[in-house]
Image: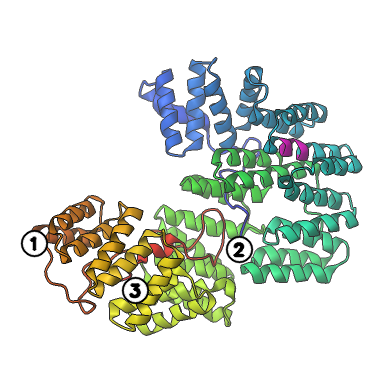
């Protein structure tokens, strides 16, 4: 469960007849309101797309298209959104219609080719892919080339497929895909030498990819190199904290002597190609295109759960948490990704503030497997996000105790427990944890920031502390929260001119943060710039501060700010962290990530 997915998420496992959402239902509210006009549907579609709701937008665009069938812009948009939302049957019709006016539209050609592959129309698919290849462009050539290779495999022509991939190996950007699929095709055909060489090259290029690791381990095992296969799994677990279910299932297969190739049908090979190319789009922020490729992969192989996980991650990035949850629930218990899917489901429930459901799901997973440290860590992060710091501290401690010697992959356990301890007034333990975290990552800006500011706030080890905060700013000079930390540290030390300089920079970096604006107002007041202080406090009030800060600002606007005693003063306000707290990145499942801004930046002044 703990490994980093190239992407992990899903908007729907779009099995035939089981596509995500009923797009037809999306237009009902418009019809009910009597807005069933072209402009009504179009505005509804724009609104849905602005809110990142691909499924609703797809339906509204199709309804708008019905009112203006000659509008190629609407047709183009309708196609991409329908593919991305998983309505492939409708998408094929739209693709055929669009190709009459835009014969070089690559999404239309790809959609049509995939439908032909699924229906066994190999000749027609090769012709469609030939047209796609002529469109030009790297993604188009790669889609066409990889799919053509797997169609050639389906024709029992392994030599032809491998030769086709070799011809495709032109630009350097093609090599990761062509090398991997050379290995997958050779392994499928039982050509162990070719498979081993190609998959080893893929592994050396991307040793952190679970798909590459699995393909290579399976090929090694099939070739009889069991020691090397297990060694690769050991290295994988050590590098990324491991994935108990993922690696355990592979080890069991190796021990039983039942290790099939990663790809066991040409159609699944074509699906794997689409999944891999979709991850490239997702990394570059092309969410609709990525979702479309993942949906097409699932259309060819409804059990392509890596594509499903990747699609769900796209939904998460679009903040479509309900859609992501629905997808993760389609990954069956017992599958190597099922625990990862349950954890991602819990994180999405937490994002929807359905905290009790998230905790129940994670607690059950931990009870089922108390050795699953990564899931325990996520449970602690959810408690921390809820500001239940005592329970978070206990949960992190369980994980640390279970690990014994904490490996580098889990260094943030100490950082997170340090936060929980600081928030529950266990400062000695918190300081120990922060310093332990720094033994793993001595220059980590967030740990330096949190520990340094906390020491200043307590009036302890001031020289060392201010040095820590300066190092944090030097490491992340564009992080407004950390710059604010330095400015507020200067303020707490009574160095008000220095505070103004840094806090003005922090406000430029984070102009609508209420706490940073409030800090700058305080600093202005102390240097005699009282009119500007009032202006800054008014800004802070307008940016939706929490109730405690709202009351503090109201008092300052009414009365000004009294004399402040450097360091020894009580905190003038409390800067709460932005709601996130899980420590999980949006594009990967990673149990021990580098602290993100949302984890730590908002805690720039843990107690101020």
**What crowding class fits label 2: few (fewer than 14 Cα within 10 Å), some (14-19), or many (20 or more)?**
many
Q: Main secondary structure of the magenta part?
A: helix
Residue 519 is inside the magenta segment? no
- Taking the image as shown, residue 322 lies to the left or right of residue 289, namely left
- Taking the image as shown, residue 601 lies to the left or right of residue 331, namely left
- Classify mark 1: helix, strand or loop: helix
- Hey, which quadrant is residue 251 in on the image? bottom right
Q: By what rule are the colours in the image chosen?
A: rainbow
Residue 144 is inside the magenta segment? yes
- Which of the marked residues, 1 or 3, is nearer the chain's N terminus? 3
- Hey, which quadrant is residue 228 in on the image? bottom right
User: Could you tell me which quadrant the N terminus lies in?
Assistant: bottom right
Looking at the image, is 106 positioned above or below residue 4?
Answer: above
Looking at the image, is 82 positioned above or below residue 397?
Answer: above
Range shown magenta: 141-146
Q: Residue at x 77, y 51 (%)?
A: 180
Percent x, y of residue 447: 44, 72
Q: Which mark is residue 1?
A: 2
Residue hosting label 3: 453
Q: Residue at x 28, y 81 (%)?
A: 459
- Classify mark 3: helix, strand or loop: helix
Percent x, y of residue 265: 80, 45
Q: Residue at x 80, y 41 (%)?
A: 168
Percent x, y of residue 136: 70, 31
Q: Is residue 98 among the parts visible in the rendering? A: yes
**Tags 2 and 3 touching, CB below 8 Å:** no
Task: State the separation of the CA atoms marked 2 and 3.
Answer: 34 Å
**What crowding class fits label 1: few (fewer than 14 Cα within 10 Å), some (14-19), or many (20 or more)?**
few
């Amino acid at each position: 469960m703990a490994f980093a997915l190239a992407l992990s998420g899903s908007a729907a496992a779009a099995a035939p007849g089981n596509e995500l959402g009923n797009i037809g239902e999306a237009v009902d509210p418009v019809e009910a309101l009597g807005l069933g006009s072209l402009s009504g549907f179009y505005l509804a579609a724009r609104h849905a797309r602005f809110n990142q709701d691909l499924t609703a937008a797809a339906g509204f665009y199709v309804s708008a298209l019905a009112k203006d069938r000659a509008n190629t812009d609407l047709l183009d948009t309708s196609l991409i959104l329908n593919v991305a939302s998983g309505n492939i049957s409708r998408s094929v019709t739209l693709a055929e219609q669009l190709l009459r006016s835009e014969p070089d539209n690559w999404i239309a050609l790809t959609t049509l080719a995939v439908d032909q592959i699924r229906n066994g129309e190999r000749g027609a698919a090769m012709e469609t892919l030939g047209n796609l290849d002529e469109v030009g462009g790297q993604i188009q050539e790669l889609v066409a080339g990889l799919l053509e290779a797997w169609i050639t495999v389906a024709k029992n022509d392994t030599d032809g497929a491998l030769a086709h991939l070799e011809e495709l190996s032109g630009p350097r950007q093609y090599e990761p895909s062509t090398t991997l699929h050379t290995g997958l095709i050779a392994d499928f055909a039982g050509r162990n030498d070719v498979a081993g060489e190609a998959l080893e090259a893929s592994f050396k290029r991307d040793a952190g990819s679970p798909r590459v690791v699995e393909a290579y381990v399976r090929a090694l095992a099939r070739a009889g190199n069991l020691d090397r296969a297990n060694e690769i799994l050991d290295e994988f677990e050590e590098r990324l904290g491991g994935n108990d279910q993922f690696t355990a299932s592979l080890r069991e297969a190796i021990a039983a002597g039942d290790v099939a190739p990663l790809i066991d049908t040409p159609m699944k090979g074509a699906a794997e190609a689409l999944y891999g190319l979709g991850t490239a789009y997702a990394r570059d922020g092309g969410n609709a295109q990525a979702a479309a490729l993942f949906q097409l992969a699932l259309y060819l192989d409804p059990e392509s759960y890596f594509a499903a996980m990747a699609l769900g991650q796209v939904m998460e990035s679009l903040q479509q948490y309900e859609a992501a949850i629905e997808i993760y629930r389609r990954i069956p218990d017992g599958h190597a990704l099922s625990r990862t899917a349950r954890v991602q489901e819990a994180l999405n429930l937490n994002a929807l503030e359905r905290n009790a459901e998230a905790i129940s799901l994670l607690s059950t997973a931990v009870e089922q497997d108390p050795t699953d440290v990564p899931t325990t860590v996520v449970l602690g992060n959810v408690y921390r996000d809820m500001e239940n710091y005592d329970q978070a501290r206990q949960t992190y401690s369980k994980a640390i105790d279970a690990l014994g010697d904490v490996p580098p992959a889990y260094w943030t356990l100490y950082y997170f427990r340090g936060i929980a301890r600081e928030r529950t007034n266990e400062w000695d333990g918190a300081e120990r944890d922060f310093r332990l975290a720094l033994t793993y990552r001595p220059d980590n800006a967030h740990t330096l920031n949190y520990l340094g500011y906390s020491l200043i706030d307590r009036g302890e080890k001031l020289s060392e502390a201010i040095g820590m905060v300066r190092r944090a700013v030097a490491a992340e000079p564009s992080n407004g929260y950390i710059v604010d930390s330095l400015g507020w540290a200067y303020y707490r030390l009574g160095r008000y001119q220095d505070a103004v300089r840094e806090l003005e920079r922090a406000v430029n970096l984070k102009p609508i943060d209420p706490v940073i604006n409030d800090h700058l107002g305080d600093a202005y007041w102390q240097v005699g710039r009282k009119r500007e202080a009032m202006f800054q406090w008014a800004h802070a009030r307008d940016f939706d501060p929490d109730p405690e800060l709202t009351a503090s600002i109201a008092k300052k606007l009414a009365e000004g700010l009294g004399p402040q005693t450097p360091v020894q003063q009580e905190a003038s306000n409390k800067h709460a962290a932005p709601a996130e707290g899980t420590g999980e990145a949006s594009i990967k499942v990673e149990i021990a990530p580098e602290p993100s801004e949302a984890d730590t930046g908002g805690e720039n002044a843990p107690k101020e």
